[in-house]
Image (spheres, helix red, strand yellow):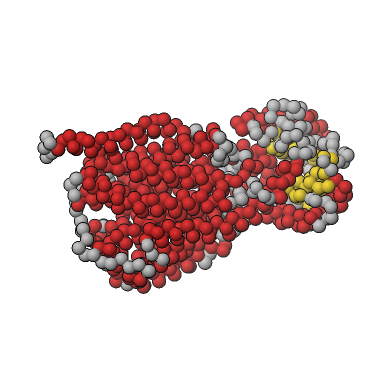
Amino acid sequence: MPTPATRPRRGARLLVPVLLVAVWIVLGGVLGPFAGRLGEVATNDQAAFLPRSAESTEVIDAQKAFRQDETLPVIVVWTTDGDTPAADRREAAGQALASLDGTPGTVGRASPALPSEDGAALQGVVPLRPDLGDGLAPALERVRAAAERVPGTTVALAGPAAAQADLSDAFAGIDGLLLAVALVTVLVILLLVYRSVLLPLVIIVGAVLALGLACAVVYALADHDVVRVDGQVQGILSILVIGAATDYALLLTARFREELAARADRFAAARAALRRSWGAVVASAATVALGLLALLLSDLTNNRALGPVGALGIVAAVVSTLTFLPAVLVLLGPAAYWPAKIRPAEGRDAGGRVWRRVADLVDRAPRKVWAFSLAALLACAAFAPALTSKGVPLDETFVDDAPSVTAQQTLARHFPGGSGNPVVVVAAADRLARVVAAARTTEGVASAAPVSASGAPGGTPLVADGRVRVDVTLQAAADSDPAKDTVARLRTALHGIPGADALVGGYTAQQYDTLRTAERDRTLIVPVVLAIIFLILTVLLRSLLTPALLVATVALNFLATLGVSALVFRHLFGFSGTDPSVPLYGFVFLVALGVDYNIFLMSRVREESVRHGAREGVLRGLVSTGGVITSAGVVLAATFAALGVIPLAFLAQIAFIVAFGVLLDTLVVRSLLVPALVRDLGERAWWPSRPAARTDAP
């Protein structure tokens, strides 16, 4: 019972946490709406995310000499019922295309209506402006309305414009839906695990405040073109902040509960919990933030965009965890855990029964435990080479059926695979004949013709700055592996023509260059991320051997996850492969986030080893952190799994890789492999330093 003399002092001590909570509430009210406004500054124009130095990107710049504006083509596909005469259908289709010239959103003239060889379909290309934004859907509706005036036909819209519209639809409402799914998932898990009423709500509020802060900063930077945001980056940011803020909060609240059990003063308990947790939280956040910033080394704009945006999200999560959360815990005290009782526990009794049994198993047979765990991970990793990352065909881009995919399949049934989406060649005008001849004789090419000044087939070639443009139609679908192989052969053939200075671009070439760039990025960025993690662990643990072991185990966990993903994607989900960026994203998230749990574990093991010796330190650290780290892993896996609500294969694959990998890391690597290795090594694990046992430590 506080005395009258102590009441003013206690009131003064409450002033700081009250002010902190008040400041965060104000910030939440001001910045919170930005979590739903990132879509205003986001772009889903895939042309903005091409490799900076690729040949296909040079072609985009070279094309500007031939026309004032870039275009986003939509391919109109008419399939016929056979009742209307072919000549009438073609004439009506030509009139429909011509009627679109000069309408809002279009650029230049539409192509003529071209019949298929089987006579069952027609196609035409309508060039649209690439910067339509919200005006893209109305422009496509005008195209469809004009096309539907052709009697005896069924209309479908394919090509880049239609695909971009479907992509925008996939991300529509992403802010509210994704955030709601993630928060509800986290709340349910926390309620089930902790059986507390207030604590889950406090953690959720802290995560939402962190997200509001992150989104406000990212919004301001994107609005000033400092960073670029698309739907994928937008969705990953929400998941990353919610998951990371929850993980850090669980570590701090678990330590606060321990300190409350050891001392009655909530202020002292909060100080002790913060003092003993902040190092692990900051080190963990640093691994993720710096790992994400390593993406700045990428030559792909969307990878570079995710780096600083994700790092800002992690910083916001740490700031919220180390300021708002301790302030609320001080104000609530033991009531934060109501109706659960806070009981003191010592030694290995500080954890649950399950974790005491796990610790006993590790203590009794460490070599068998790590050998069995290692063998299981290696068996899974053996399937990793089966995961192909050469890109996915258009019909696998969306998890659900999309109109543009169906239209593209219809187009491919009646026309050469690359129809309406040609490879674009820009070359010297005085070498035009040789360029066209070489292109036509390249394996995989259906046709090649220069773009004419009139826009009509066979007209006088358009010359700009001494260069011409040649459109090359491929036999294979523009998004297929054979088409990419044809691009490689075409470049070899055209680059060998003296004086032609030929550049090969277009959609297929962009896909090919993106694949090559992604391979280069993985080769460069993966070692950088591993080096960053090793340095942070070395500083935190003051050891060389243990950080090396931890880096090796998380890398093995990543390979094992890829092996399982290869089997699941092909045989369960039906994916033939992944986007080229999926392995890199999966690596950065899984390795950087996975090492978090080893940081939480090993920082506690070192603390306990100083007090009780190496052997007892491992066992006490495992028991005391087992429950909270497992809960954190389940929460993080569930939040990333929420990305599956967006019907895109890219995000579904990222969701599975990170969710499964985090669970594998939490339940096998951190629970069995790492403790068993450290237990087997004893004090040698801390080489070159050896934390001396101080059994008299408080």
Query: Is 85 located above or below residue 474 in the figure?
Result: above
Q: Is residue 555 left or right of residue 407?
A: left
Q: Is residue 430 visible?
A: yes
Q: Is residue 366 visible?
A: no
**Which percent across, then down, holds residue 362?**
32, 68
Residue drawn at (39%, 30%) of the image = 29
Residue drawn at (26%, 57%) of the image = 351
**Which percent across, then down, holds residue 292?**
50, 50
Query: Is 600 located above or below residue 189 in the figure?
Result: below
**Which percent across, then down, holds residue 456?**
84, 37
Number of disc labels? 0
Quarter holding the N terminus?
A: top left
Residue drawn at (30%, 48%) of the image = 274
Quarter holding the C terminus?
A: bottom left
**Which percent across, then down, holds residue 356?**
27, 62
Query: Is 67 located above or below residue 549 in the figure?
Result: above
Residue drawn at (78%, 39%) of the image = 65
